[in-house]
Amino acid sequence: MKNGKTIYHIEFKEDIGRPVKHKYYTNLKKLCEDNDNLGVSWWTLVRLKTKDFPFENGVCHIRKGVLIATKFKNRSE
């Protein structure tokens, strides 16, 4: 059983004319579809998926982490 869900955090750099913005994704494909002009292709990120994170270029930082959630007990128990 996994201890958590893989999550990708993207932070856009301020110097490209937009405010710093943080987004979180559980899927690299969706991250690339939702964000134009990342300066890196989806396939490059797939090849990096198991090793060279964090990724950084002139446009953004992409970090890989784990989302850990707790199970809530039913209050009636």
Image (cartoon, rainbow, N blue to C red):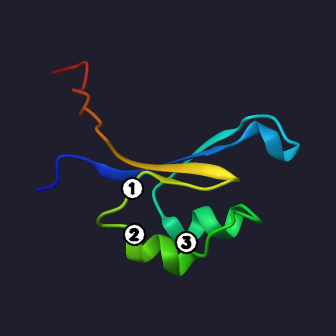
Local crowd size for mark 1, using a 10 Å CA cut-off: few (<14), some (14–19), many (≥20): some
> Secondary structure under badge 3?
helix
Residue drawn 51% across and 81% down?
Answer: 43
Q: Are marks 3 and 1 in contact (CB under 8 Å)?
A: no
Q: CA distance from mark 1 to mark 2?
A: 7 Å
- The kind of residue tagged 1 is Phe
Question: Looking at the picture, does residue 74 appear above or below residue 38?
Answer: above
Question: Looking at the picture, does residue 46 appear above or below residue 15?
Answer: below
Residue drawn 25% across and 32% down?
Answer: 70
Return the residue at label 3: 29
Q: Nearer the viewer, residue 21 or 13?
A: 13
Return the residue at label 1: 53
Pointer 3 or 1: first along the chain: 3
Pointer 1 or 2: first along the chain: 2
Pointer 2 or 3: first along the chain: 3
Q: Are marks 1 and 2 in contact (CB under 8 Å)?
A: yes
Q: CA distance from mark 2 to mark 3?
A: 13 Å
The residue most toward the front is 58
Q: Are marks 2 and 3 in contact (CB under 8 Å)?
A: no
Q: Position of residue 57 (x, y in %)?
A: 61, 56
Q: Position of residue 53 (x, y in %)?
A: 39, 55
- The kind of residue tagged 2 is Leu
Q: Nearer the viewer, residue 69 or 9?
A: 9
On residue 64, the disc is none
The residue most toward the bottom is 43
> Secondary structure under badge 1?
loop
Q: Position of residue 33 (x, y in %)?
A: 67, 70
- The kind of residue tagged 3 is Lys
On residue 48, the disc is 2
Q: Nearer the viewer, residue 71 or 34?
A: 34
Left or right of residue 74: residue 30: right
